[in-house]
Image: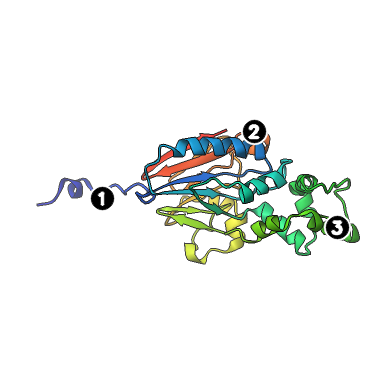
């Protein structure tokens, strides 16, 4: 005898979940706003007091630097003042990619025009002319390397590209539709916009990302975007996942 579920048609897919033994906190793009990060950390700490789970996972989705004027303070907080009792995961954003490229000998002008001047200022390296050329860019790079604490550079170099918990994939920007998750390119994971944002594909995991600003968190069937433009709006967003539940914390 056919079951009611079979008679009515295909079963409703189970909602995406994280493992029963953990609660996940995912933080959107910080962009040099240490003040907002400190406030959000207080919210997260208070929220986590109610957690009866064994694991608390804190995933930062990248773009710690640029645009806001406290990039040094943000990295210092993440390196030296991590929230106790959490597994912390730090994902690489496109702004860290630009900064590292410059530190490793790249041109650097794209970085400067995209908020890198604010990061330099936070390390007491002032830029008065965004139209710098070869030798001037090289002198600026040497000054930044001299001011950049070794532990800050080590933090930037060990950033991860992706993280998976249960039915969720955490990346900075998104994924390339039609490409298996295991075959995704680093460039897409930290830079993609349109093809990913417009896709209705089932990616195999719900993709939690930042990178593209929206005035409110975007909760779609296949993705969740939590970059709410903190550097300009004062709204730094955190997605909380527990079992099949989703909640938002926000400054």
Q: CA distance from mark 3 to mark 1?
A: 61 Å
Instruction: Between label 3 and label 1, give the one nearer the viewer.
Output: 3
Q: Give SS at disc 1.
A: loop
Q: In the shown orientation, is residue 21 left or right of residue 102?
A: left
- Mark count: 3
- Crowd tier of the residue under label 3, counting other residues whose Cα lies within 10 Å: few below 14, some 14–19, many 20 or above: some
Residue at the image point whose x is 66% and y is 45% from the top: 74
Q: Which residue is mark 2?
A: 233
Quadrant position of residue 161: bottom right
Residue 153, position as x, y percentages in the image: 70, 58
The answer to whether the residues at label 3 and label 2 have Cβ atoms under 8 Å apart is no
The colour scheme is rainbow
Residue at the image point whose x is 72% and y is 47% from the top: 72
Give above or below for 117 relative to 247: below
Give above or below for 77 relative to 233: below
Query: Disc 3 or 1, which lies upstream in sequence?
Result: 1
Q: Which residue is mark 3?
A: 137
Residue 10 badge: 1
- Crowd tier of the residue under label 2, counting other residues whose Cα lies within 10 Å: few below 14, some 14–19, many 20 or above: few
Q: Give SS at disc 3.
A: helix
Q: In the shown orientation, is residue 43 left or right of residue 9?
A: right
Q: In the shown orientation, is residue 10 left or right of residue 231?
A: left
Residue 248, position as x, y percentages in the image: 48, 36
Q: CA distance from mark 3 to mark 2?
A: 31 Å
Q: Give SS at disc 2.
A: helix
Query: Disc 3 or 2, which lies upstream in sequence?
Result: 3
């Amino acid at each position: 005898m056919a079951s009611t579920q079979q008679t009515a048609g295909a079963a409703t897919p189970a909602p995406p979940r994280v493992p029963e033994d953990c609660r996940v906190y995912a933080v959107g793009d910080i962009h040099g706003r240490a003040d907002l990060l400190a406030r959000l950390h207080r919210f997260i700490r208070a929220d986590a007091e109610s957690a009866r789970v064994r694991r608390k996972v804190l995933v930062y989705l990248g773009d710690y630097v640029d645009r806001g004027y406290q990039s040094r303070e943000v990295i210092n907080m993440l390196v030296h003042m991590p929230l106790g009792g959490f597994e912390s995961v730090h994902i690489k954003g496109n702004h860290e990619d630009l900064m590292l490229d410059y530190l490793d000998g790249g041109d650097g002008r794209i970085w400067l025009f995209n908020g890198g001047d604010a990061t330099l200022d936070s390390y007491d390296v002032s830029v008065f002319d965004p139209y710098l050329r070869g030798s001037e860019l090289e002198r600026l790079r040497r000054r930044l390397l001299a001011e950049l604490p070794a532990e800050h550079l080590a933090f930037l170099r060990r950033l991860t590209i992706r993280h998976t918990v249960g039915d969720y994939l955490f990346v900075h920007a998104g994924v390339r539709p039609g490409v298996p998750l295991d075959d995704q390119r680093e460039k897409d994971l930290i830079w993609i916009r349109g093809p990913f944002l417009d896709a209705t594909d089932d990616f195999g995991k719900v993709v939690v990302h930042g990178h593209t600003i929206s005035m409110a968190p975007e909760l779609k069937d296949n993705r969740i975007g939590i970059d709410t433009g903190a550097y300009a709006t004062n709204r730094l967003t955190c997605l909380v996942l527990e079992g099949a539940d989703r909640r938002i914390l926000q400054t």
